[in-house]
Amino acid sequence: MPLKSIIPKYTAAVILCLFSCADGPLKADDARNKKEVPTIEDAVIFNEAYGWVKKAEALIGTEKENSDEQAELYLKATQIKPDFLEAHYNLGLIYANRNKNEEAARAFEKVIEIEPAFEGIYQLLASAYGKLGNPDAAIKTIEKGLKYFPNDLQMRRALSMLQINAHLDKAAIGNLRKIIETDPGDLDARMDMARLYQRNGEMDKAEEHYLIVSNSDPDNFAAHYNLAQIYMRQKKYREASDKLESADQIRPGDPVLLERLGDAYAGQLELEKAVIAYSSALDNGSDKERVYAKLGFGQANLNRIEEAVVSLENSVKHNTNSADVYHLLGHLYSELERTDEAVAAYNKTLEIKPDQKDVLYNLGTIYAEEGRLPEALEALKTALQIDPEYASAWINLALVYEKLGRDTDAIYAHEKAIELGGGRALNYFHLGVLYAKGDQADQAIDAFARAIEMEPEPYRGLLLEELKKVHSVLDSVRYKDKFIRLLKTGPPAD
């Protein structure tokens, strides 16, 4: 703030009055107010102090403005006349302009001591306190100033900002409400009010003020963007994308906005639009790892498998600790029959997040398909330790046990899958074979009947083909009337 002269214009008149009236008798009224009547000594002191002030004022607009020399001139004035308000004020301004905030605060404190109703001083002192890292003192200063100037909206706004920064949200809302009551068109106050309500989870109130701002000022980027954030939180994805599209018209190419727009489209399952938005966010320099991951998930859901793999590989280049990304990569590699890479991705997922039953299931399935049965067994059993009711894992575990020749364990696993509601025709067919191998004819026929009931083909055909063999696992049932009828007519009636 530039220095200014606020010296009273009546100085010469006061001095003349002192010389012309000094010998006259005191009147009654004069007697009552004699403490306010300046004396010759006062005039001499004032003139001497004022001389230094004039020298200081002469430096305004020169290269010595705000210099040590100018400060020293005002300081001498205050030493001669300690209650020289204007000297303290301008001295404080010099210190404030030079960022010597401790000295500035002392000077402004002196101004208030001399004249508590001095306009503008409370904000200056609060600013000095703020720069000294003392927000509490700054807040108390403005609150004190408002007692003298209750209608000063600028001071009230300064107080609200201090309160916001100090997270005194309730107090800040109270001050902002007073500003808006006085000036309903103060959109800055409404924006601050909306942000505070949003920060405190009062989304309806925040939305109300953001809407007023966005309607009054259609080019207000923050109002549109923050409304979109509220709608995203409320899962109102259509409203969110509308507001984000408006914000993008105001400030095109904002990478964070484009990412959020992609999220809003994804929430509406508009995956093509989501992929375009995420790609644009990347082109405009957004956070690579996160957006590459979102892009990859979108492409995978659109069955653009190879593109998704490229995006997810780019994601893990920037962040090697995303279990979800490695999990999806493993699935996509498996889809592309890139088995070794799928296994590596699944194992990386488990390094980051070990208790992933689906990853263990997928890994066990790959191992089983590759004939790595001990590894398949370990992966599937670990998945079942995490979730003993994981029916799909029981099914694959049963098949692995069969390949290992552990028929009793295989029967238990198939029966467990059926018990958990995961039983399929496959389970019943394999159970029939296992029961037949163990000479449990009735259980075998019942299991075959259930398989054929669920899927007549191919299971009736498989049984007929097996019976052509001279020596078959079906030898224990091939001549049973119930089995023969099953193959001719289908499952027996209950």
Image (cartoon, grey):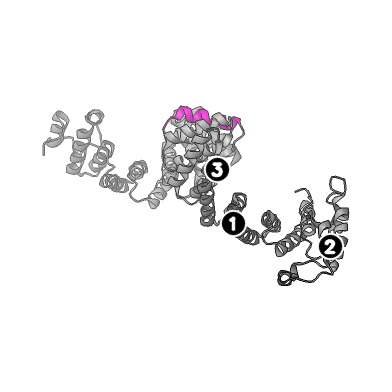
- Which of the two discs, 1 and 3, labels the residue nearer the N terminus? 1
Quarter location, residue 302: top left
Residue 275 painted magenta:
yes
Contact between labelled residues 3 and 1, with CB atoms less than 8 Å apart: no
Q: Residues within 10 Å of mark 1 (few under 14, many from 20)?
A: few
Q: Residues within 10 Å of mark 3 (few under 14, many from 20)?
A: some
- Which of the two discs, 2 and 1, labels the residue nearer the N terminus? 2
Quarter location, residue 61: top right
- Residue 309 point in image, percent of width and height: 52, 32
Q: Say left or right for 324 vs 143.
A: left
- Residue 442 point in image, percent of width and height: 17, 43
Q: What residue would you read off at disc 3?
A: 186
Q: Main secondary structure of the magenta part?
A: helix
- Which of the two discs, 2 and 3, labels the residue nearer the N terminus? 2
Q: Mark 1 belongs to which amino acid?
A: Ala
Q: Say left or right for 212 vs 163.
A: left
- Residue 338, labelled with which disc? none
Q: What residue would you read off at disc 2?
A: 46
Front residue of this view, candidates 397 and 346: 346
> Nearer the viewer's eye, disc 2 or disc 3?
2
> Nearer the viewer's eye, disc 2 or disc 1?
2
Front residue of this view, candidates 420 and 4: 4
Q: Residues within 10 Å of mark 2 (few under 14, many from 20)?
A: some
Q: Mark 2 belongs to which amino acid?
A: Phe
Q: Which residues are magenta?
A: 268-284
- Residue 88 point in image, percent of width and height: 78, 59
* Quadrant of the frame with the C terminus: top left
Q: Label 3: state its secondary structure.
A: loop
Q: What residue would you read off at disc 1?
A: 166
